Amino acid sequence: MASSACVLAAAALIPAAPAFAPVAGAIPVHTQGPIAGFDADMSNRIAAVDAYLGTRPGITGYVMRDRVTGGIYRNGNADTNFWTASTIKLAIAEDLLNRARIGAIQLGPDDRALMESMLATSNDNAADILWNKYAGIDRMSFNNAFRANGMTGLVPMPPTTSLEQVKLFPDWGFQQCSPADLDRLMDNVLTSMHPDDRAYLLDRMRHVDTNQHWGVWGAGAAMNPGLKNGWSDEQGGWVVNSVGFAGPGERYTLAIMTEQGNQGGYADGAETTTHVAQLLFQGR
């Protein structure tokens, strides 16, 4: 968390993390045989996830990657664009660390505190300060880096709430991307960052506040997960997203985004994202 009192005071009121029970019962058998890049057990787990999503409210897209076998599974909505909500803060943190590593910027103690608050509690005020400080004169420095770091389908959206906000285009809070974009972002963090910066960022993702103990967190403590979640009540309904990793050596990555529309709310989206991670990874 940030040590700055002004950041703590400005932290937004956010929903508490719902409580979830462990997965119970047998996982259905995938009758079509193993999915390319995955063994029979994981193929069955993927089949169980797809069946589960058919019962859930809203629209959900996800991408799961096995970094040992090279297997990548993308469901039918993997390329659908959703509001990023606060998952984009992972991309902000990666870019700040990358720029500091090559000497393009200098991150002082206050910047570090803001970045840690942005990751730990998803502090919006901290993200605002960092964005406005490091977005550049044309405000495109972050977005250019996001695309270079794998988010090739990311689309900055013009704010519509006020003329003053329109002048601030692009802004981190008005971005859309797909689960495939978040999958590539997470893979970029794991494969392209300087080892010291990567270790720092993964540690921060493993030590998020309890308000983010859902989504990929559903993999379970034995899988030592780390994540960045995002949730927002948009005009079209709640968007609830999670991106992160799980398993020894961060073997698995998962990017999942769900738009509830008029069918559900925050708790429904958090339950969906968490149970997907449970089905995929618990007991693996």
Image: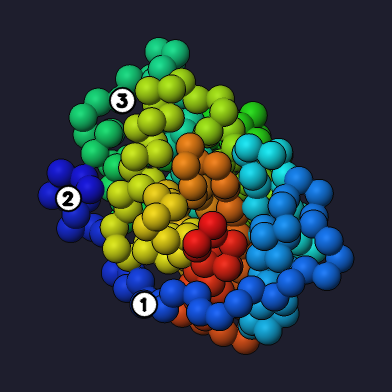
Assess disc 3: are there few (<14), some (14-19) or many (≥20) residues with their C-alpha within 10 Å of its C-alpha: some
Q: Residue 142 appears at what percent x and percent y? A: 53, 34
- Whole-angstrom CA distance, mark 2 to mark 1, is 30 Å
Q: Residue 155 appears at what percent x and percent y? A: 67, 48
Q: Earlier in the sequence, mark 1 or mark 3?
A: 1
Q: Residue 204 appears at what percent x and percent y? A: 33, 42
Q: Which residue is mark 2?
A: 6
Q: Tell me if 8 is positioned left or right of 171 in this view.
A: left
Question: Amino acid under label 2?
Answer: Cys
- CB within 8 Å, label 1 to label 3: no
Q: How is the image coloured?
A: rainbow
Question: Amino acid under label 3?
Answer: Leu
Q: Which residue is mark 1?
A: 19
Residue at x-position 15% and y-position 44%: 3
Badge 1 marks a residue whose secondary structure is loop
Q: Which residue is mark 3?
A: 107
